[in-house]
Image: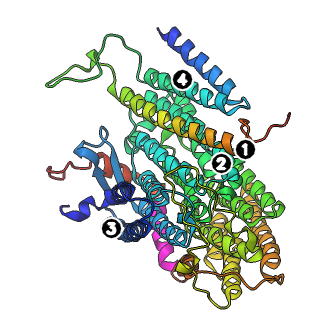
Amino acid sequence: METALALAIGILTASGLWLLFRPRTFQVVLGLSLLSYAVNLFIIAAGRLRTDAPPIVGKGVVDPAFYVDPVPQALVLTAIVISFATTALLLVVLLASRGLTGTDHVDGEDDEP
Amino acid sequence: MTGWHQHLIIAPIVLPILVGALLLAFDERRRSVKRVLSFVTTAALIGIAALLLGQADSRFGAGGAPQVYLLGNWPAPFGIVLVADRLSALMLLLTAVLGFTALFYAMARWDRSGPRFHVLFLLLLAGVNGAFLTGDIFNLFVFFEVLLAASYGLILHGAGAERTKASLHYITINIATSLLFLIGVALIYGVTGTLNMADLAARVPQVAGEDLGLLEAGAAILWVAFLVKSGIWPLSFWLPRTYAAAAPPVAAIFAIMTKVGVYIVLRLTSLLFGGGSGAAAGFAGDWLIWSGFATMLFGTLGILATRTLTRVAGHYVLVSSGTLLAAIGIGGEALTAALLFYLVSSTLAVGALYLIIEPVERNADEEDMIAGVAEPVFDDEYTGAVAEEESETGVVIPGTIAILGGGFIFCTLLLAGLPPLSGFIAKFAIIDALFDGRITPTTWILIGLIILSGLSTLVAMTRAGIDLLWTPGEDSPARLSVIEVVPIGFLLAACLALMVEAGPLFRYMEATSRGLVEPSSYIDAVRSAPRAGEAKP
């Protein structure tokens, strides 16, 4: 599972970075989305990978060995919400920029007509 | 520890959010209600910050501890904590003063050039205050996002093609930076298993072997994220353009945002990589010094090369960030005290400069006066025509030029660091502290760059001043409303107060600096913070 996760993070990051350096605003937005998926998976990995272990600890005396670390899951939840919201905002700015400058180039002007 | 003052520490975060939410309920046309509410809020924030500062200074005079607030009453390393020590309280007060003046200035006309200015402004203040108070690195990320989200809205305030283009870059860079922030936080959590800054400080010395490399990699990625915010070279190319595109009051409040990055670097360096942190001690010090130098050089060249005052101000922000980061990299108690004084002085001065630039340039060519106000983008936007409502605030002051010129000279002296104003005291204190320590080639480079940047600021400001203020215009002097003069005067008066009260202030800074060099009282206060309803151990 470690290999699969590492590959997933790697591929997502690489594609995200490549898109981030493209000149069209929409590609940049997609790149940022892919990067944020990669980062979310990475945060989960930082809490150590476990299968079949619940993150929510029950009442009474519990043995932490049976549970997965709940903190990274809470962090990912927060990170997902935040990156979702900021990406939505970026899309609005993208549309405004497209409307105002007449091009979807990231600099607001096309070098080659 | 009972009663209202115990909960005062959370007020700088909760109050602006609550009032901001309340303001959303009012229609854009009821601007006066919004103005009164946000004005009262920002004024109240100054009072709260001053109270916290008083508490921080008196409560833990010699051997006491910073005030710790457990959110949700969870015990320290598990829940999120807010900590108000001297440094946090100082930054809160600085934010409140700058926020109050920028908002005051915005009421002259800028808050009319787009919807929901006051809401976004208050949310920005809440985010900045939260970032200064929090004692948890993930919570810090959340507050960073709060302040960034509000700043995205503010940078677009007034709309227009230039602002949209600049904000597209600004937002993209900051989202990418936030992702770096998350990677850094995740790595640090993976190694140490905690997010609480004080708990981290206790665990970092125990990290060894392979984990140390991982921890330093995480910290380095985190540092990159903060250094982008504080505008270090070569990660700062977005800054002058973005700040120049922003509306003047927005740019003024943005002057505090680079300082948020500087504050975090200072705080985490003190806690995580200070003297007592074992193998990780002194992390990234050299990097900070040299990239700080590069930033100062870049900023200095930028100041000389640009023709517009807003860009000069943007590059000056870079110079001040560079100075601060290089000084943090060198470290030491006396130098930290001096750099804190410099931080306060330069932030207030840049804020004043951003506010004064607009009336000065308007004076030079009045046709552009309305240029900053663009067509409405959304249907529900109410753009009260600026020209129509001019009479509301447009009390003509005789001798506009005299006031503007005087203020401009004042700003120039402050920024260039000429005696007798606080800018000089700050730079003098830094150089003095450098001579007290071990003198190396680095010391001489920093001193040289400080003096060189001051000189270039003086040259650029003089050139701009002659151009804008002395050259006789064809028209009569532009109108200057009282609402614009008062906040500029307030900021300059604050700088004057810094100069007059430099002695007591330096004692405060030195106490702050001792707390940073020897952070054990901070760490102990957080780790042993009693939960409400429990007796103090």
User: Which of the pair B535/B97 is nearer the observer?
Assistant: B97
Q: Main secondary structure of the magenta part?
A: helix
Check disc 3: other Cα within 10 Å, few if <14, some if 14-19, many if 20+: some
Check disc 4: other Cα within 10 Å, few if <14, some if 14-19, many if 20+: many
For marks 4 and 2, give the CA distance: 28 Å
Q: Secondary structure at mark 2?
A: helix
Q: Identify the amino acid type marked 4.
A: Ala
Q: Secondary structure at mark 1?
A: helix
Q: Which residue is mark 4?
A: A38
Q: Is residue B222 visible?
A: yes
The reply, left or right, for residue B311 in relation to residue B128 is right
Check disc 2: other Cα within 10 Å, few if <14, some if 14-19, many if 20+: many
Q: Chain of mark 2?
A: B
User: Which of the pair B382/B172 is nearer the observer?
Assistant: B382
Q: Percent x, y for residue B227?
A: 61, 46
For marks 3 and 2, give the CA distance: 43 Å
The answer to whether residue B513 is magenta is yes
Name the quadrant containing residue B442: bottom right
Q: Which residue is mark 2?
A: B164
**In the picture shown, does residue B433 fall above or below B535?**
below
Q: Identify the amino acid type marked 1.
A: Thr
Q: Residue at x 22, y 49 (%)?
A: B530
Q: Which residue is mark 3?
A: B55
Q: Which residue is mark 1?
A: A101
Marks 3/2 same chain: yes
